[in-house]
Structures are given as structure tokens and as C-alpha cells.
Image: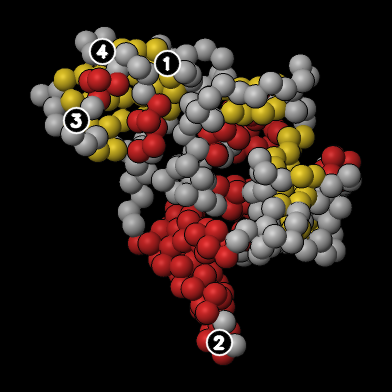
Amino acid sequence: MVVVWQGEGAPPSLPVEVVVRDVFPIGLSHARNRGLAVAAAPVVAFIDDDELVGPEWVGAAISAFTLEPAPAAAFGPVEPLDDRGLPYCHLEPGEPRTFASMSVPPWVVGTGGNMAFERASLLELGGFDIRLGAGAEGRSAEESDVIVRLLRRGLRIGWVPQMGVYHPTKLEHEHLASRYPYGFGMGRVVRKHRALGAAARYLAAAAQSYGVGLRTKDARRRREAAATLRGFLAGVLKPLAWQSPPGALTRAPLDLQPRLEGGRWQPEPLRTDPSIRLRYRRGHELLEIWVGQDGDATVAAGSGDGTGVAARDSFWVLTETK
């Protein structure tokens, strides 16, 4: 088991057999990639941090990759953990099936809260796009992006009913708050891959849901469908600038905080080659955050004529520019 920790405090105390990585908070995709990097097994599975797995989950995930021809990934159902509120990312078990066509919409295949991969295939794919997912500019849909890339390579994806997890329900306002980010992320995926067919189907599904809300006088359904549509259109129409996450500045090292106060730092495009680098500009000042990638060492990189400060899994460089 690998736990990738991005919380503000120190990681929790866990049994010695659990591998813990304390990483700089760029977002969910970055965390998953860091976990993928240290995992040793040929099959790597991912769940959300608030989920519980069913008793058959591990065995079902492993068994999915013993089939012939073996899939590159497997997804499973997500069912409500409690009756506190509305089901969240609810996917019924159904029957086993295989997805192998590029025409399949990614949201039909599965959700990121319950998925497993042949590690070699996911590494060859380049892992998750750190510009997508919770905490990043894309807000969500990192798993949908991976699904599209796998299917476009001609690889197979399995649906495994026995591979079940349980997700806490959400109150009505919590459920509504998730609709815009989900729509936005899907819009980014559609724009990134120029998936016009998927765009048309997503718009049709959201419009249909809104229509059902009108006919049944279900105000909650109308609000959720409208938020989804707004998010999706914003994700499709907004240029793919992929800005550095503004929230990263809250993790500035103490020695550097006084110099960062006063005035607003404008995020600049995130850079990922050859290293992950976040960039922010304020007037003639440029702040670069070089983020560690091996899960242990701080990346000591950057400009030699700036103020460099080593911090948690990162190296901060503040430079005066012309």
C-alpha cells in the first residue's frame, strides 16, 4: 500500500509496511504519478481517500489482468457508503464487459475513484496528466484523459463488477458544488483530444438531464444539469493555457514568505519538461517552484542569480527580471 500525502501537516502515523510519500501539493494527478513511481507490483490500483473497498476488491482487481487478452486497465462500481445524502459517483455493478472502441465516451467506462492498471502500460502512457484532476487547472477528469489515451492506442479496458468500493454520500449543496468542476474537466479533455463525438454526447446527456428536471419539476436536477453544462462549455472554450495552481503559494517556506507578501502573483503556464516547474510573476519578479519527482529528495535546481530556498519536496527560486 502506498499513501501519497499532500496535507498541510505531517503525514499520519501508519504501519511500517505502508509506503508514505510526503509530496508537494500540485494535485491529484501528481499524487497518483508519485505513487505509481514507487509502486513495485505489476498491477497498481487507485481509490479516493474517503472510500472503503469491498471484501473482494483486491482479488477482483488482480484477476482482471489474468484474462486473455489481458486489459491494460480495469474499472469497478462505486456504491453509497451511507444514507446521509445523495449517492456520489454512483456506478452500479452490472455485468462484466470490455471496452476497446475509441467511440466509447470515457465517462461510460468508469471513474477515478476505483480503477486499476497494468503498471507497465500506465508508465508507457506517461501516467496521469498533472494539468487535470482535483487541485489542478483542469479540476477533474484525469481518469477520462487516461481512458481516451488507452483506447486510442488500441488497448482494452475491463469493467469488473466484483471490484467494488463504497463512497460517502453528499449533501445536496455538496453534490451541486461538484457538477461545475466535473463538467469543466470533461470539457478540457474534449478540447485536448479534439473529441467532437464525445463533446456532442456529453452535451446531449446534460441537456437531456435538464429536460427531465423541467418535466418532473425537479429543481435540484435542473440546477445540477445547468452547472454541468456551464462547466463543460467553459472547459471546451477556454484556451489550453494550463496555468500553475495558485494554491501552491500557500506552501511557501517561512524564510521566503516576507518577500512574497504585498501585490498579487499572476500564475504562468505550468512546465513539465524536463522537470515540474510552477511559475508566478509579480511585476519584475519571477517565482519558480521546482517540484521533486522521486518522492524523497528536494530538487535543487533553478537560477543561480536568484534567491533559492529549499522546502518540502520543492526548491523555490525568486528572481528579479528586466
Q: Which mark is residue 127?
A: none
How many angstroms separate mark 2 from mark 1 (CA)? 53 Å
Marks 3 and 1 sit apart, C-alpha to C-alpha, by 21 Å
| Residue that badge 3 annotates | 262
Numbered label attached to residue 307:
4
The residue shown at (49%, 67%) is 228
Residue type indicated by callout 4: Thr
Could you tell me if residue 239 is visible in this image?
Answer: yes
Q: Position of residue 51 (x, y in %)?
A: 71, 45
Q: What numbered label is drawn on residue 311?
A: 1
Residue 286 position (above or below residue 99): above
Closer to the N terminus: mark 2 or mark 3? Answer: 2
The residue mark sitting in front, 3 or 4, is: 3
Q: Are marks 3 and 1 in contact (CB under 8 Å)?
A: no
- Of callouts 2 and 1, which one flags the residue occurring earlier in the amino acid sequence? 2
**Residue underneath mark 2:** 217
State which quadrant residue 169 falls in. bottom right
Label 1 SS: strand
Foreground mark, 2 or 1, reads 2
Is 7 left, or right, of 322 in this rendering?
Answer: right
